[in-house]
Image (cartoon, coloured by chain):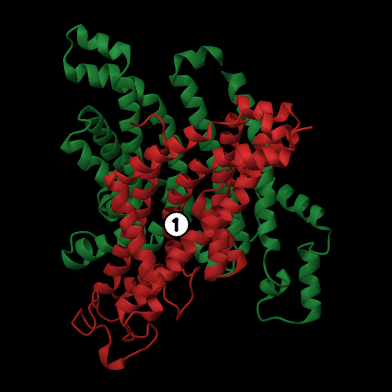
Chain colours: A green, B red
Amino acid sequence: MLNFVLRRLVIAIPTIILISIFVFTLQKLLPGDPVLAMAGEERDPQVLEYLREKYRLNDPIPIQYLNWIGNALRGDLGISLRTNQPVLDLILEKLPVTFQLAVMAMIIALLIGIPAGILSAVKKGTFIDYCANAIALSGLSIPNFWLGIMLILLISVKWQLLPASGFVSIFEDPLRSMSVMIMPAFVLGTALAATLMRHTRSAMLDVLKSDYVRTARAKGLQERTVILKHAFRNAATPIVTLTALLFGELIAGAVLTEQIFTIPGFGKLIVDAVFNRDYAVVQGVVLVTAVGFILMNLIADVAYVLLNPKLRNLA
Amino acid sequence: MTHASENVSVPDPILVAKRENRVWKKFRTHRSAMVGGGLALFFVVVALFAPILPIDDPAATDWMAVRKAPSLAHPFGTDEIGRDVLSRMIWGAQASLLAGVVSVAIAIGLGVPLGILAGYFSGWVDAVISRCTEALLAAPFLVLAIALAAFLGPSLTNAMIAIGISTTPIFIRLTRGQVLSVKAEDYVESARAVGLPTFKILRRYIFPNVLPPVLVQGTLSVATAIIAEASLSFLGLGQQAPDPSWGQMLNIAKNYLHQAPWMAMWPGIAIFLVVLGFNLLGDGLRDALDPREK
């Protein structure tokens, strides 16, 4: 197993190198001289030359990349032009906020998506199946930022049931945190619930056709036991890996949700950085997100092998 | 020497025609695909005919009709500077559909040739293309699109380029997989054995087989691209004022939820319907083209 994990880690290295080259190249897409963007209003040639030297922009591009990636490997992702804080510190400060939002959204998605998927598969071809599929497709088609706006309009503005914005850590005040975060978590979790429902349905349909389910039924087991113990347990393997993959998507999907509900997280950090032309922060966020995504892929692969006895022995 | 292609065991044209007929028949009878197709077509027609429809100028402001609720004069109400929401919605459809179609065209234009190269030639070509694809897939779609749009500068064109580039890896991976399975087919082996030029094999035997899944993915990707464009415009990175787009309209509307909720309602419903249309159409195409589906 350890060999398998190490092998997967080695395979991930070229991907990380390539994505780092891509992120580095982003800066080169900036129209005009990047020093002018850094200098703001300042146009003194001496200052511009000083900045060019300071950021080693006179070096050949491959050398600039090596400097940049060398620093990134030591945890130095540059300094935010706006706040003057190290980019890594900013990311580490915002990440727990988004993480809490993502975990809550994932719980909501699992609570809706899996039971709906099982029910839809068991009742295939019935009105329930039709409705579940229609709701899932709608969930995938609704832009989540619009859903957020509509929920704010109804629940916060009209009925005044929940606050429309802000953030409270779950460790500070769990109840207040739940009331502030439940709406954004629901918005973020909807599309995910739809994806999970569709995958659970198709995995369950495959398993329900198998011989061991037929045998379980022939033995006279209760339908509930057949579905939950025999069928779902086997259908769960691809769902677990999908969940790991989707968690990475959640962190990215939080960009818009955090913007609407004014949550000071990772997503808001990148959007604010874009508007403040704080390019080091944008690069840092993309790099960290991509590396996190690759790690989630790795976890999904390992989980798949661990949960599948046939592959476990091969690994 | 006779033409090499004449000796190749190509798929029977009668069988191909029969299959096409079957696919079309299946597609025509697929109820949800028809609904989806109808929805998508409706928005395409509205967007195309926007210049000749009898509607107000989408940029015309009326300070006497600021944030007016829906009425006969303005069926969808007016916005914060008295512009007609309906005409902005109709003109906004152009931006959304254009972004959806152009960005997917960019992704197909880049992704399919690269996928064919990777799948057909294998070796180092495949290794380089596949590693680059994995790297791009490692960055979440929206984050990648935001970063690209931010560095390229905010505009509808740059948003389309950003979405197109972010969508490309999906098509590279899909095409590569399809080519790998097609190139093992007997007729491709025979074509190679009789010395048919590579370009001809790719054009005649590989490309037509790659097309159906690309068509399905393309339709579904238009839906994703429309949401992505709306998201970028919502963040201020897509269509720029005063030209309307649904995402940008929502961005402004969120500031007037108390006073003018209709400003937020219509653009969202439009995005939902058009995206649902393309999703249904894509699902229907997939079912029609899937030989296992009866």
Give the residue pinned by disc 1.
A255
How far across and down, in percent of the image, does residue A15 sit? 65, 40
- Farthest bottom residue in view: B64
Q: Is residue B53 above or below residue A141?
A: below
Which residue is at the front of the view, A192 or B229?
A: B229
Q: Residue at x 16, y 38 (%)?
A: A127
Image check: A5 left or right of A158?
Answer: right
Which residue is at the front of the view, B72 or B162?
A: B72
Quadrant of res B89: bottom left
Image check: B125 left or right of A126?
Answer: right
How far across and down, in percent of the image, does residue A176 sit? 26, 53
- Amino acid type shown at disc 1: Val
How far across and down, in percent of the image, does residue B87 sit? 33, 78
Residue B26 visible in the picture: yes
Quadrant of res B246: bottom left
Q: Residue at x 67, y 35 (%)?
A: B120
For mark 1, name the chain: A
Q: Quadrant of the N terminus of chain A?
A: top right
Q: Residues within 10 Å of mark 1 (few under 14, many from 20)?
A: many
Q: Quadrant of the C terminus of chain A?
A: top right
Residue A106 visible in the picture: no
Q: Residue at x 36, y 32 (%)?
A: B293
- Farthest top residue in view: A219
Q: Residue at x 51, y 28 (%)?
A: A301
In what element is the residue under mark 1?
A: helix
